[in-house]
Image: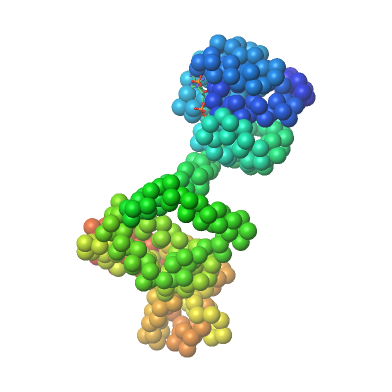
Amino acid sequence: MHNAIIDCPIETLRLGFIGAGATGTALAVRLRERGYPVAAVASRTRSSADKLAVAVAGCRSYDSKQEVADSAELVFVTTPDDVIPQVITEVKWHPGQSVVHCSGADSLDVLGKAKSEGAQVGAFHPLQTFVGVTHAIENLPGSTFALEAEGPLLEILKGMADSLDGHWVVLKPGDKGLYHAAAVIACNYMVTLVKMAADLWESFGVPTSEAMQALLPLLRGTINNIENVGLPDCLTGPVARGDLGTISKHLDALEKRAPAIAATYRDLALQTIRISLAKGKIDGARAEELSQLLRNKPGGIAMRTMLKGKIHRARVTEANIDYEGSISIDPTLMEAADILPYEQVHVLDITNGARLETYAIEGGPGEICINGAAARLVYKGDTIIILAYHLVPEEEARYCHPKLVYVNSQNEIVSTGQGVAGSV
Ligand SMILES: NC(=O)c1ccc[n+]([C@@H]2O[C@H](COP(=O)([O-])OP(=O)(O)OC[C@H]3O[C@@H](n4cnc5c(N)ncnc54)[C@H](OP(=O)(O)O)[C@@H]3O)[C@@H](O)[C@H]2O)c1
């Protein structure tokens, strides 16, 4: 089938825009600068379309979206996400043209009607934040673009990202939700975190404008460390140091003076424990203490320590006294029993009655190796049970289902089950 796009050099690939807001205008202005002809624009209001047309040489504004679709080979639909399906339905598309949206959350299914009418469809999401037209034009170059498309259109979109001095990543349809959630966490929720910090300053009498003067150098320093030192080593602060006393003081102050923020503080601190462990500044035992402190809510919400996972009658394949204290476990068994690397585990030696606490690390296939001092209690060839517990609020404890993993003498899984509370 003849495809106009394939034969079309960039200088003759006429672009059209439906939606003349921040993203549409920034793309139109910057792509025109990079040699792509922008032929047509329409928007909800004629005044927005006119503004974009004035800013982009050679671009004509129209009242109707259909006129844009009829006069462009590649049409960007840069309306709000919720409006994209409506635009696609209202316009008649034709073979040989391409229709591309810029949504981070939607996949290509919203362009289904354009595809059924013969158009190629794609997504071109700038991983960037645009608060208005001027900032969008400024911020766009150098961004990463998340692409979805097939064949020649994908190559064209890659070329556009390159021409905007950007990077690109090609997403599979099922990845879009997680991809966009990540963008929202890194961008929008950073704003939320700064607002929470500024609100705390207000509560001890410093207005937000002054708080921002103090917080901005801290934010810049943090971004600088993320960029130059990288994860996980850029993490500092009390969770990174395992400083229980400091965190207790924070929790006391927040519960008394800013209870609405306390729950978020706890959740973020719990997520931060994983980074501290990866940085290697705290060990599994300190991580567990931090976790208990952060999960134990004030006002006496009762927590129960419940069995979370069990590997039953595994055989010890090695005992290595010279290695750092831990137990190396076949990752398949760890996953089946819901045990994470560096998670605290209890080891019960059926052969000699010894019991000990340590933390799990991933070993090779079939491996169960006792490392460090514990190798004086548990020996190669012993049969052991490995248990992992978690703290669960009282009201959830009755509905817990630990993951039970039964293995043979080769440490291969024979069966798995979900225990019912009271039966294990
Ligand atoms: N803002 C960001 O940070 C950002 C970042 C990456 C991707 N995006 C994506 O870019 C797309 C556009 O977002 P945006 O932030 O640029 O939005 P925006 O600034 O609000 O602009 C949206 C434009 O769409 C027009 N519009 C609304 N309903 C329409 C309709 N029925 N028919 C034709 N035009 C219509 C509006 O027209 P009028 O001006 O004429 O009223 C407006 O100019 C979205 O898919 C968004 O997810 C945004």
Residue 332 location, x and y as percent? 51, 63
Residue 405 location, x and y as percent? 41, 65
Q: Is residue 293 visible?
A: no
Residue 312 is drawn in which quadrant? bottom left
Asked whether, in this view, residue 156 is left or right of residue 395, the answer is: right
Residue placed at 67% from the left, 21% from the top?
56
Tell which residue pokes out farthest to the bottom in this image.
376
* Closer-to-camera residue (338/225): 225
Q: Quadrant of the C terminus?
A: bottom left
Q: Total label count? A: 0
Residue placed at 36% from the left, 72% from the top?
245
* Closer-to-camera residue (300/410): 300
Residue 127 is drawn in which quadrant? top right
* Closer-to-camera residue (150/333): 150
Q: Quadrant of the N terminus?
A: top right
Asked whether, in this view, residue 52 is left or right of residue 242, the answer is: right
Residue 63 location, x and y as percent? 55, 11
* Closer-to-camera residue (347/222): 222
Q: Is residue 301 visible?
A: yes
Asked whether, in this view, residue 180 is left or right of residue 308, the answer is: right
Q: How is the image coloured?
A: rainbow
Residue placed at 29% from the left, 64% from the top?
252
- Residue 369's place in the image compared with 332, above or below, is below
- Residue 45's place in the image compared with 102, above or below, is above
Residue 265 location, x and y as percent? 37, 57
Residue placed at 39% from the left, 75% from the top?
346
- Residue 35's place in the image compared with 364, above or below, is above
